[in-house]
Amino acid sequence: MPDGTTDLPVSDLRRDLAAAYRLIALEGMDDSIYTHISARLPDGPDGEKRFLLNPYGLRFDEVTASNLVTVDETGAVIDDPYGAGVNAAGFTIHSAVHMARHDATCVLHTHTVAGVATSSVKEGLLPLNQWSAQFYDRIAFHDYEGIALDLAERERIVADLGARNVMFLRNHGVLVLGRSVGEAVAVVMNLERSCQAQIAALGMGLTPVVLSDEVAEHTARQYEKAYESIYTKGRDPEWAAMLRRLDRAAPEYAD
């Protein structure tokens, strides 16, 4: 995918990232004060790499544009309005991806029941429906090494991710990259539905109909073409609709 949209005004990027936290909470995809969504900021005046992350200790439904923490690539806090720092394990994963993949404005990581369950089986996500066909042959895998506190694991995460934009962290959860915050949210919601649908279908005790390789690949390319059109034109109607939802449900996210 092309370079990330770090030319977005910082105020808009902060708003979008806060919105992502609130939307993930509204969808029940958060995990207490754990997991993270990060966004790449424009480089600092001396060229330092800077990222936004949630304050440690806040639930996703407490994150606002103004309390997001700014950190550099080493994890050093540059600006911390809330005063609680960030989660070290969260920074390990996100810094690795951002530093290697400059095309990603947003990196989103979840621990949902469906996502963890699907990441915990050898077969991963099967092409059982239109949602899951989007991800056909496009998911990377990283084996579980324990809670991600070891900075040395960053190299292995990056190597396993390669050029792909979706990763199953085995026995752990999922990771999604987006050219914008809106793209990352849309993709992870489709991924979550795909995992839920697979669990439901396989749990029926009937014979699943797996899409052929040809149909699954064709569908995945259709999704890619649609996303490319959206982000080439620079207008994302789905993200605009999500923000309208938040403006009604939790307008303080933008504070």
Image: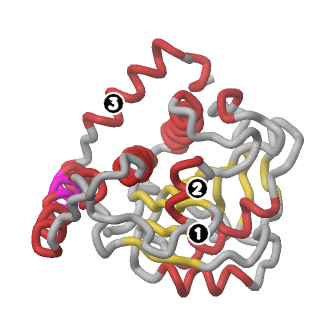
- Lateral position of residue 243 relative to residue 143, left or right: left
Residue bearing the label numbered 1 = 169
The C terminus is located in which quarter? Answer: top right
Front disc: 2 or 3? 2
Tell me what residue is drawn at x 45 percent, y 83 percent. Answer: 162
Residues at circles 2 and 1 in contact by the CB criterion of under 8 Å: yes
Residue type at the position of mark 1: Leu
- Which of the two labelled residues, at mark 1 and mark 3, occupies the earlier sequence position? 1
Residue bearing the label numbered 3 = 240
| Stretch of the chain drawn in magenta | 223-229
Tell me what residue is drawn at x 25 percent, y 47 percent. Answer: 234
**Quarter holding residue 169:** bottom right
Q: Position of residue 221 (x, y in %)?
A: 16, 66
The N terminus is located in which quarter? Answer: bottom left
Q: What is the distance, in whole Å, between disc 2 and disc 1 at their CAs?
A: 9 Å
Residue bearing the label numbered 2 = 109
Tell me what residue is drawn at x 65 percent, y 86 percent. Answer: 155
- Which of the two labelled residues, at mark 2 and mark 1, occupies the earlier sequence position? 2
Front disc: 1 or 3? 1
Q: Position of residue 53 (x, y in %)?
A: 68, 50
- Lateral position of residue 163 relative to residue 17, left or right: left
